[in-house]
Amino acid sequence: MTALQTLIADPLHDENTIAAFFSPDYQQCVDGKQLDYNGFITHMKAIKSHTKRMSISFKSVVSENDKVFTHHYVNVENNRGDKSEFEVFSCFTMSSEKIICCEELTRMINGLPEDSDLGSRS
């Protein structure tokens, strides 16, 4: 998915990039935590301020009607140089070419315990 690749790989927090891919009505449930559009912006800002570099690799992507399911991995290098890896399962709902909803489960595979909440940190 271009949206995730663009958002994750760019080391800078850019609200215009978020607006290009995500609806103002966006809702996300990640690891049981609910975020609206503004909460998602806060989440991405927190992640970008904590990390030096992130990359994403997709294991599988399946699309049907307005749903896109992904199984992907995110590799992270934080500002101290510590590395971590996350496995992510996501179900995105699309509308008018923008993402309107995401239901996500994220688990740390490798890394420091204090980084284990990166999937839902705000």
Image (cartoon, helix red, strand yellow):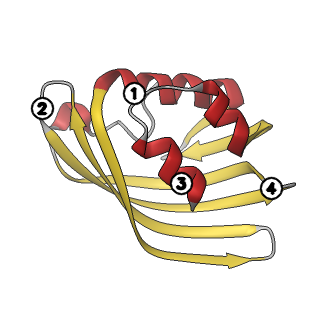
Q: Are marks 2 and 1 in contact (CB under 8 Å)?
A: no
Residue lying at 57% horizontally and 57% vertically, measured from the top left? 2
Query: In terms of secondary structure, where does tag 2 sit?
Result: loop
Residue identified by numbered label 2: 81
Left or right, 19 with respect to 11, comes to right
Residue count near mark 4 (Cα–Cα under 10 Å), binned few <14, some 14–19, many ≥20: few
Q: Are marks 3 and 1 in contact (CB under 8 Å)?
A: no
Please, what is the three-letter code of the amino acid marked with disc 1?
Answer: Lys
Q: Earlier in the sequence, mark 2 or mark 3?
A: 2
Q: Earlier in the sequence, mark 3 or mark 1?
A: 1
- As measured in the structure, the alpha-carbon distance from the residue carrying label 2 to the one carrying label 3 is 26 Å
Residue identified by numbered label 1: 48
Mark 4 vs mark 3, foreground winner is 4
Mark 3 vs mark 1, foreground winner is 1
Residue identified by numbered label 3: 104
> Between 109 and 19, which is closer to the camera in this rendering?
19
Rendering quarter of residue 46: top left
Give residue 18's position: percent from left, percent from top.
Answer: 64, 35
Please, what is the three-letter code of the amino acid marked with disc 2?
Answer: Gly
Q: Earlier in the sequence, mark 2 or mark 1?
A: 1
Query: In terms of secondary structure, where does tag 1 sit?
Result: helix
Residue lying at 38% horizontally and 56% vertically, measured from the top left? 56
Q: Quadrant of the N terminus?
A: bottom right
Residue count near mark 1 (Cα–Cα under 10 Å), binned few <14, some 14–19, many ≥20: many
